[in-house]
């Protein structure tokens, strides 16, 4: 019976996170914003080139 509660408590425990989680999240967010900016800039450049 105790083994059931041990398994339950380990399943409900907060997931382990390392120190790099926050840095990784910031880097992924920054990269996403960078590539979104590149895509928007390329779109404006193409429209500007086509419009003359």
Image: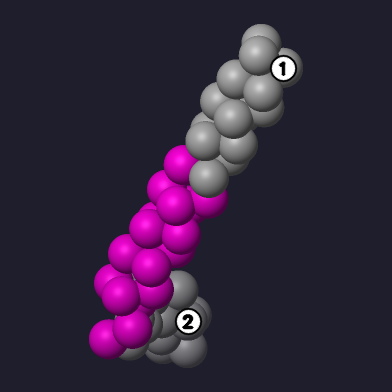
Q: Based on the displayed image, in which of its 4 quarters is residue 20 positioned?
A: bottom left
Under circle 1, the secondary element is: helix
Most foreground residue, 43 or 31:
43
Q: Main secondary structure of the magenta part?
A: helix
Secondary structure beneath disc 2? helix
Residue 25 pos. (x, y %)? 37, 65
| Circle 2 residues within 10 Å: few <14, some 14–19, many ≥20 | few
Q: Report if residue 11 is visible in the image.
A: yes
Q: Which residue is mark 2?
A: 7
Q: Quadrant of the C terminus?
A: top right
Give yes or no for residue 41 being in the magenta stretch.
no
Residue at the farthest top position: 51
Question: How many numbered discs?
Answer: 2
User: Which contiguous range is marked in magenta?
Assistant: 19-37
The residue at the point 39 percent across, 56 percent down is: 29
Question: What residue is shown at x 38% (from left), y 68% (from top)?
Answer: 27
Please state if 20 lies on the left or on the right of 45 as rendered: left
> Residue at the spot x=59%, y=30% of the render?
45
Q: Answer above or below: position of 38 versus 24.
A: above
Mark 1 crowd level (few <14, some 14–19, many ≥20, 10 Å Cα)? few
Task: Give the side of residue 29 with respect to residue 46, left or right.
Answer: left
Residue 50 disc label: 1
Looking at the picture, tell me which residue is in the foreground, 39 or 10: 39
- Seen from the viewer's position, the closer of residues 43 and 19 is 43
């Amino acid at each position: 019976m105790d083994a059931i509660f041990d398994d339950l408590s380990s399943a409900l425990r907060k997931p382990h996170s390392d120190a790099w989680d926050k840095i990784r999240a910031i880097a992924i967010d920054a990269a996403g914003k960078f590539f979104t900016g590149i895509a928007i800039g390329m779109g404006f450049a193409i429209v500007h080139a086509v419009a003359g």
